């Protein structure tokens, strides 16, 4: 196999076909069901599924042409009341038999708009500049199905043998994949014994080498509601007698983490970090250095209001030690408040002591912590012994366990190094990710003997879920070529 020949085919397809498709994909506000309860009526998820299906189907050769994706079964599956998914099954070629199967994973649903986009950018406004495609979803991870088919088709066009390849492309990942168990059960008789899983929904530490995701944190969260009055009252009359619901909420949050350093207090949310993952964090920290924290858009003196420059200090991370920062992000729990209600806008905020405060909480948990147990504990901590006997309720809406990759065989590790050297001139690097992909834990349970390559294109400044999200086009092309090389060699 000559990876350069495959890369030429892949680069051409990206330029001529994939990028135009992704430009159209960005335009569609295919928000995940958690952010668009009327998703079925709006039809945006159906639109992106139909578009990806039509493109994938067109990749198969016509009669009389060189066999490409021959015998492919490709379909859109709809279970009543659930978001649609795409499933494909492509028979093996060459010397590969039915005992080797690779399963690909990706998703087409998106996060909501988010504010803060640059003036010439927007979530549904595709813009290509400086080698990046800006807009919501292309990197997280609408590109996955297109990259997968490009990799497989390039192998077939070069008559390079490959194993049987399956794929599941879902549309509720950003909501925690609640519909996925039903699809896995529905497809179980057709999947067989999967020996390699390739997921393209993760991140990369830089755009200079392959990054292999070794773990994913879990996630628990929900809505904390604190009520102290039946209705709002004049703050001049009530303050000093009626406690602020916001102060009560602050007191409850102090039960969860240390306000000075952010450390989550209850040990139930913690896990022992395996020595191998500490060693990989040290390797990644040596590669990335300060970039591990400098990649984020910190408030700095360059944006200080006029006349306040001398008093300005640039914002700082919780730790400037790259290894500690990586471990904090990948193996230690962390609490965030991601939303609020019952707070009037500034222009409507009168001198009123509000009757309640409502906060959306999100806690990332280590890969090996059981999410259901953590969620139960979170509720108990927040609801017990309510200050001032306020009405305190915590309604859980997330409980997704993380994922910890099985040990990697030496041969596969060497192959990934070789492929990374061929594509980027640098060896592969390994690092856990702070995000959550519930599908990985589900697959780990379904296929305990399978090997995993979880990787992706979400590198420095790509800002998934936030404003100015982008796909690094050159890196996505190279990763597609690397995946093609992996598919034909990993199980040979």
Image (tube, rainbow, N blue to C red):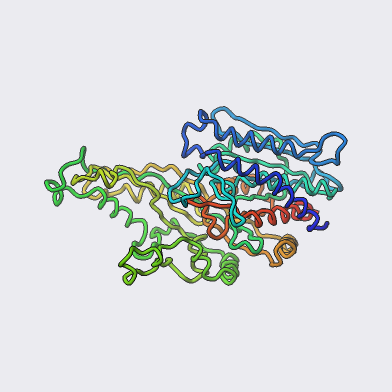
The residue drawn where x is 21% and y is 37% is: 230
Q: Against 139, is 188 above or below?
A: above
The x, y position of residue 303, in whole percent, is 39, 63
In the image, 450 versus 178, the foreground residue is 178
| Residue 301, image quadrant | bottom left
In the image, 224 versus 407, the foreground residue is 224
- The answer to whether one can see residue 244 in this image is yes
The x, y position of residue 334, in whole percent, is 43, 57
Image quarter hosting the C terminus: bottom right
| Residue 264, image quadrant | bottom left
Q: How many marks?
A: 0
Q: Against 265, is 249 above or below?
A: above
| Left or right relative to 188: residue 300 | left
The x, y position of residue 491, in whole percent, is 78, 53
In the image, 381 versus 237, the foreground residue is 237
The residue drawn where x is 51% and y is 54% is: 463
The residue drawn where x is 74% and y is 35% is: 73
| Residue 283, image quadrant | bottom right
Image quarter hosting the N terminus: bottom right
- The answer to whether one can see residue 368 in this image is no
The x, y position of residue 4, in whole percent, is 79, 58
The residue drawn where x is 54% and y is 29% is: 81
| Left or right relative to 310: residue 400 | right
| Left or right relative to 164: residue 437 | left
């Amino acid at each position: 196999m000559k990876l350069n020949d495959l890369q030429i085919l892949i680069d051409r397809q990206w330029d001529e076909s994939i990028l135009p498709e992704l430009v159209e994909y960005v335009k569609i506000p295919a928000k995940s069901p958690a952010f668009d309860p009327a998703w079925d009526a709006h039809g945006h998820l159906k639109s992106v599924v139909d578009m990806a299906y039509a493109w994938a189907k067109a990749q198969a050769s016509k009669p009389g042409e060189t066999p490409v994706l021959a015998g492919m079964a490709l379909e859109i599956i709809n279970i009543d009341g659930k978001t649609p998914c795409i499933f494909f099954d492509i028979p093996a070629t060459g010397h590969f038999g039915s005992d080797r199967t690779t399963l690909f994973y990706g998703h087409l649903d998106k996060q909501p708009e988010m504010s803060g986009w640059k003036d010439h950018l927007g979530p549904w406004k595709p813009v290509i500049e400086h080698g990046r495609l800006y807009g919501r979803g292309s990197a997280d991870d609408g590109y996955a199905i297109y990259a997968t088919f490009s990799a497989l088709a390039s192998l077939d066009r070069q008559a390079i043998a490959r194993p049987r390849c399956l794929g599941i492309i879902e549309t509720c990942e950003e909501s925690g994949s609640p519909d996925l168990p039903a699809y896995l059960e529905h497809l179980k008789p057709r999947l067989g014994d999967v020996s390699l899983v390739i997921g393209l929904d993760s991140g990369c530490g830089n755009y200079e080498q392959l990054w292999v995701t070794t773990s994913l944190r879990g996630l628990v969260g929900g809505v904390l509601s604190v009520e102290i009055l039946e209705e709002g009252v004049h703050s001049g009359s009530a303050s000093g007698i009626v406690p602020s619901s916001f102060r009560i909420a602050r007191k409850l949050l102090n039960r969860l983490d240390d306000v000075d350093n952010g450390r989550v207090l209850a040990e139930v949310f913690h896990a022992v970090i395996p020595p191998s993952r500490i060693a990989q964090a040290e390797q990644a920290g040596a590669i990335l250095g300060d970039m591990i924290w400098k990649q984020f858009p910190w408030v700095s003196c360059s944006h200080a209001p006029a006349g306040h420059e001398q008093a300005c200090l640039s914002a700082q991370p919780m730790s400037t030690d790259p290894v500690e920062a990586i471990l904090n992000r990948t193996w230690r729990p962390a609490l965030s408040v991601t939303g609020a209600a019952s707070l009037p806008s500034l222009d409507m905020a009168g001198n009123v002591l509000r009757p309640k405060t409502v906060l959306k909480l999100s806690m990332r948990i280590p890969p090996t912590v059981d999410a259901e147990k953590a969620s139960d504990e979170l509720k108990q901590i927040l609801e017990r012994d309510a200050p001032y006997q306020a009405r305190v309720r915590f309604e859980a809406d997330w409980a997704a366990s993380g994922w910890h990759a099985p040990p990697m065989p030496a041969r596969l590790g060497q192959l990934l190094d070789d492929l990374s050297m061929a594509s980027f001139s640098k060896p592969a690097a390994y690092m856990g990710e702070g995000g959550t992909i519930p599908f990985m834990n589900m697959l780990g349970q379904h296929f305990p003997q399978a090997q995993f390559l979880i990787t992706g294109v979400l590198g420095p400044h790509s800002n998934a879920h936030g404003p100015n999200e982008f796909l690094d086009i050159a890196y996505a092309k190279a990763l597609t070529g690397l995946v093609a090389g992996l598919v034909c060699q990993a199980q040979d």
